[in-house]
Amino acid sequence: MVSSLFLLPGFTFVLELIGFLLVLGFIAKYVLPPLRKAMNERAEQIRNSIQAAEDAKHEAEDLAAKRRELLEGARQEARAIIDQANEIAEQLKEEGRQRGIEEHARLVASAQSEIDLERDRARSEVMGQLGSLVLEAAERVIGAGLDDERHRALVEEAISAAEATGTAATGGNA
């Protein structure tokens, strides 16, 4: 019977086992420590990257919240400025309208006083011319010259008659 007894260890099996254990020992002593160190360093880098990403995410969320607050504040301030500008525009519009009304009243009063002055001047002029015309008419009718005293009396009488007629014609508005 030739060594068909596989279950019994032979000398080669023991040598193979010793070689395997030596290779495992070599790997465990010289290969695995640098490999574990590299893996631990890589795991630490990954943890640090994840932590940095989370910190950046929180910071971005905080910045977004602050930006929204600032934006809302700017919107409210813009609304306040627009409202204030509208109020100022309304005030300026009202002031302009009031100044226009005052200027209109002033111009109307000025025009009325100029009209009154012109009417008085025209009336005086007409009365003066009327006096001369009455005097000429009286001289023609009487055919003789009048003395100075008689002349004044006739002029005064003609002026008062003309004023009475002019006052009655204008409705009493002098």
Image: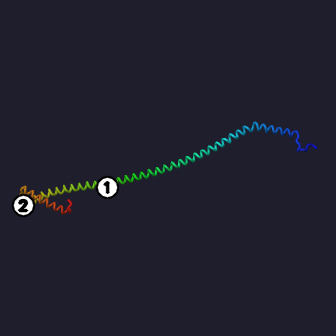
135 left or right of 45?
left
Dot 2: element: helix
Give the residue pinned by disc 2: 142
Picture coordinates of residue 42, whole percent (x, y): 68, 41
Q: Nearer the viewer, residue 164 or 88?
A: 88
Picture coordinates of residue 108, whole percent (x, y): 27, 56
Give the residue pinned by disc 1: 101
For badge 1, the amino acid type reads Ile
Residue 118 occupies quadrant: bottom left
The residue sitting at the right extreme is: 1
For badge 2, the amino acid type reads Ile
Dot 1: element: helix
Picture coordinates of residue 3, whole percent (x, y): 91, 43
Crowd tier of the residue under label 2, counting other residues whose Cα lies within 10 Å: few below 14, some 14–19, many 20 or above: few
Quadrant into which the C terminus falls: bottom left
Residue depicted at 23% across the width and 55% down the height: 113
Against 111, residue 9 (above or below) is: above
Residue 127 occupies quadrant: bottom left
Residue depicted at 88% across the width and 40% down the height: 10
Q: Nearer the viewer, residue 15 or 113?
A: 15
Q: Nearer the viewer, residue 125 or 139?
A: 125
Against 95, residue 43 (above or below) is: above
Residue depicted at 20% across the width and 62% down the height: 172
Give the CA separation, mark 1 to mark 2. 59 Å
Q: Nearer the viewer, mark 1 or mark 2?
A: 1
Against 105, residue 37 (above or below) is: above
Checking the image for residue 83, the label placed there is none
Quadrant into which the N terminus falls: top right
